[in-house]
């Protein structure tokens, strides 16, 4: 009976339930998806009210201007899901209850992916509807919203998983968040310094994949490369999967 009870206690379903509860009871992680939703829809309202689009932009691209900041919020959520436990020391209790550390990381990854995908998808659909209502008839092309909004949701989920991996590696919230912001923004900011290599430097970043998916006029081949939106998204997913595998290996080897 003791063996069965112990096995049930550390089963993946139990671990997943525990991680889900943590995500929605810790104030920092609870508020991050809400902020993400506000950013996506808030920028849609702002762009629709100010008509601040380029002539060759699309309603989809303008409506989802906030997806860039939402991607940053997704990375922050991923970091906080794990780094808070390292900072408070409660990760020791988590690993004591679940010796299979890979299962803990996998459960956290499921929570991050589901929450970020759902939040980004709902926010993107609502933002596009807002943009359509406010910008239709202004001479802008509508853009192909579906399945682009699904790709945007996947991209935010993948970035959230990158944040999770980095948070588990660095074990410090501020350091991991700063690094993630650098990973997202620096390729676009410093890409022009590399001349003809800009399309390779900026085009391989998660931000480039997001810009291509939103079909913004800023996503020109000269700045983000000629790789299509979906291949770019696949590249981001590969980054996330690789980072999680390496992180799982590192977490198993550490003392805490």
Image: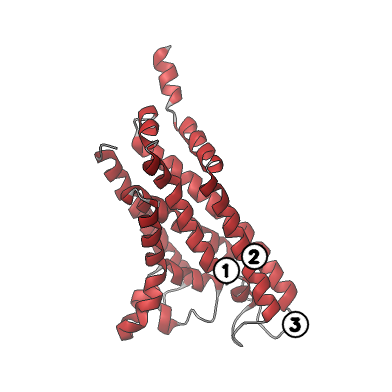
Cα–Cα span, label 3 and label 2: 20 Å
- The image shows residue 103 at horizontal and vertical percentages of 39, 37
The reply to whether discs 2 and 1 touch (Cβ–Cβ < 8 Å) is yes
Is 31 in front, or is 4? 31
Identify the residue position indicated by label 3 in the image: 137
Foreground mark, 3 or 2, reads 2
- Which residue is at the far top? 1
Identify the residue position indicated by label 1 in the image: 66
The reply to whether discs 3 and 2 touch (Cβ–Cβ < 8 Å) is no
- The image shows residue 43 at horizontal and vertical percentages of 62, 70
Dot 2 falls on a residue whose secondary structure is helix
- The image shows residue 186 at horizontal and vertical percentages of 37, 72
Dot 1 falls on a residue whose secondary structure is loop
Cα–Cα span, label 1 and label 3: 22 Å
Q: Which mark is residue 83?
A: none
Q: Residue at x 56, y 47 (%)?
A: 30
- The quadrant of the picture occupied by the N terminus is top left
Identify the residue position indicated by label 2 in the image: 41
Q: Is residue 209 above or below residue 221?
A: above
- The quadrant of the picture occupied by the C terminus is top left
Residue 215 seen anywhere in this rendered image of the structure: yes
Tell me which numbered mark, 1 or 3, is placed earlier along the sequence: 1
- The image shows residue 58 at horizontal and vertical percentages of 62, 79
Dot 3 falls on a residue whose secondary structure is loop
Q: Is residue 102 above or below residue 10?
A: below
Q: Is residue 247 above or below residue 121?
A: above
């Amino acid at each position: 009976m003791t063996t069965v009870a112990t096995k049930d206690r550390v089963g993946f379903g139990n671990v997943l339930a525990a991680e889900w509860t943590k995500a929605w009871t810790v104030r920092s992680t609870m508020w991050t998806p809400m902020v993400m939703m506000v950013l996506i829809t808030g920028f849609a309202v702002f762009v629709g009210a100010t008509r601040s689009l380029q002539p060759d932009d699309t309603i989809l691209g303008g409506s989802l201007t906030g997806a860039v900041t939402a991607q940053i919020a997704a990375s922050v959520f991923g970091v906080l899901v794990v780094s808070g436990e390292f900072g408070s020391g409660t990760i020791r209790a988590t690993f004591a209850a679940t010796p299979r550390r890979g299962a803990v990381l996998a459960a956290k990854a499921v929570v991050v992916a589901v929450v970020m995908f759902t939040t980004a998808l709902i926010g993107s659909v609502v933002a596009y509807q807002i943009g359509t209502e406010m910008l239709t008839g202004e001479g802008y092309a509508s853009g192909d919203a579906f399945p682009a909004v699904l790709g945007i949701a996947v991209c935010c989920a993948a970035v959230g998983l990158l944040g999770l991996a980095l948070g588990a590696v660095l074990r410090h919230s501020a350091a991991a968040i700063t690094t993630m912001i650098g990973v997202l923004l620096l390729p676009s900011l410093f890409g022009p310094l590399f001349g003809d290599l800009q399309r390779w430097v900026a085009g391989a970043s998660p931000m480039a994949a997001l810009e291509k998916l939103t079909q913004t006029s800023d996503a020109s081949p000269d700045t983000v490369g000629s790789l299509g939106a979906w291949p770019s998204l696949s590249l981001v997913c590969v980054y996330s999967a690789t980072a999680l595998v390496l992180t799982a290996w590192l977490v198993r080897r550490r003392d805490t």
